[in-house]
Amino acid sequence: MNYLLELNNIECRYDNNTVVKDFSFRVRENHLICLLGPSGCGKSTILRAIAGLEPVYAGEIQIAGETVSTANYSMPPNNRKLGMVFQDYALFPHMNIQDNICFGIRNSSSQNKRKLTEEMLEIVGLEGYEHRFPHELSGGQQQRVALARALAARPKLILMDEPFSNLDIELRERLSLEVRNILKAQKLTGVMVTHDQSEAFAMADKIGVLHNHELQQWDTAYNLYHDPQNRFVADFVGKGKFLKAKVKTPDSFETDIGVFSGDRSYEWPKNTDVDILVRPDDIIPSESSALKVNVLHRAFKGSEIFYTLSLPNGEELLSAFPSHHDYQVGDSIGIELDMAHLIAFKR
């Protein structure tokens, strides 16, 4: 199997403080991966180490089988054949779009620059914009130019540092899908860091969730949501609440609102205190249900409404109902829980 990028047990520090330790992952050619986590977890440091902008104090980084970083050696960033897309676009305001795109090949002929610019702008859907200046473009258009500039160097690998965080939510989601399609069409390998799970879900083939400078889980978006390996991943990825329970059998749990059985077994003794994860899509509105809850909060999202629901014992759940189920704060409603795929953690 061909891996374009390999990080083997790397360690990074700032002022003698270790921020990444014994960190490893591999990326196959033509794959897009994302490092996802809260601020301060070390994800941007890892990206900068791949780019050669931060040293590694242990381990090694390889690109296309060539070692580019060790504790004793660091290949200069400009020799790593990388393209970088930054959070703030990093476009030169005094240069037009063509000059921005061709900044890395300044010694090329005018004809080659013009041809390359036309090709790159066609790829990112901005044909005819070569003579405009950055201030004449929207944020989304500026980010496309930044991507075009990264692609112009014909890199092996694209690195993206929070590339959509300055955009509004709707544009962020649309552009992340468009950028994924562009990179896939160009058969490029990409690494992105973000704290936004929607971006990660839209962009990545595989996602690494980081917390406290350590990799918590490396998986597909589907598995991170439906099969989280620990409580942090369960809480960070997707929405949900934990419901207090006790182990009844290896695959069933007793709560204040009934016994729930799942499709997996846990090796815990009977009566062990656990928390079971309840996602919004596990809750179904049911007028005939004997289980009644009170609506504490509601947030209209268009096609659906997010509700915070209070159980009789005071525990809370989150639900997402189709918006024709229009309940008001203070309403008492009936619900059912579909917990066939049940995730539990020891309390």
Image (cartoon, rainbow, N blue to C red):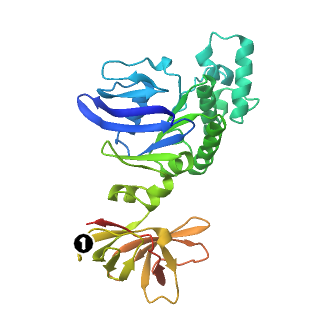
| In this rendering, position of residue 167 left or right of residue 53 | right
Question: How many discs mark residues in the rendered view?
Answer: 1
Residue 316 location, quadrant:
bottom left
Spot occupied by residue 5 in the image (x, y as percentages of width and height): 47, 32
Q: Secondary structure at mark 1?
A: strand
| Res 341 quadrant in image | bottom left
Q: Residue furthest front?
A: 1
Q: Quadrant of the C terminus?
A: bottom left
- In this orientation, which residue lies closer to the viewer: 342 or 173? 342
Q: Which residue is mark 1?
A: 273
Is 98 displayed left or right of 200 in the figure? right
Q: Along the line of sight, which residue is nearer the eye, 61 or 196?
A: 61
Tell me residue 323's x, y (percent).
60, 72
Give me the residue at 30% from left, 37% from top. 22
- Residue 214 in percent (x, y) is at 32, 43
Q: What residue sits 72% from the left and 12% below the top?
A: 110
- The amino acid marked with disc number 1 is Asp
Q: Residue at x 33, y 57 (%)?
A: 230
Residue 311 makes an appearance in the image: no
Vertical placement of 89 versus 108: above or below? Answer: below
Q: Nearer the viewer, residue 191 or 220?
A: 220
The residue under the point 62% across, 15% down is 105
Mark 1 closeness class: few <14, some 14–19, many ≥20 residues within 10 Å: some
- Residue 340 in the image: state x and y as whole percent: 45, 74
Residue 236 in sight here: yes
- Work out whether 132 lies above or below 342: above
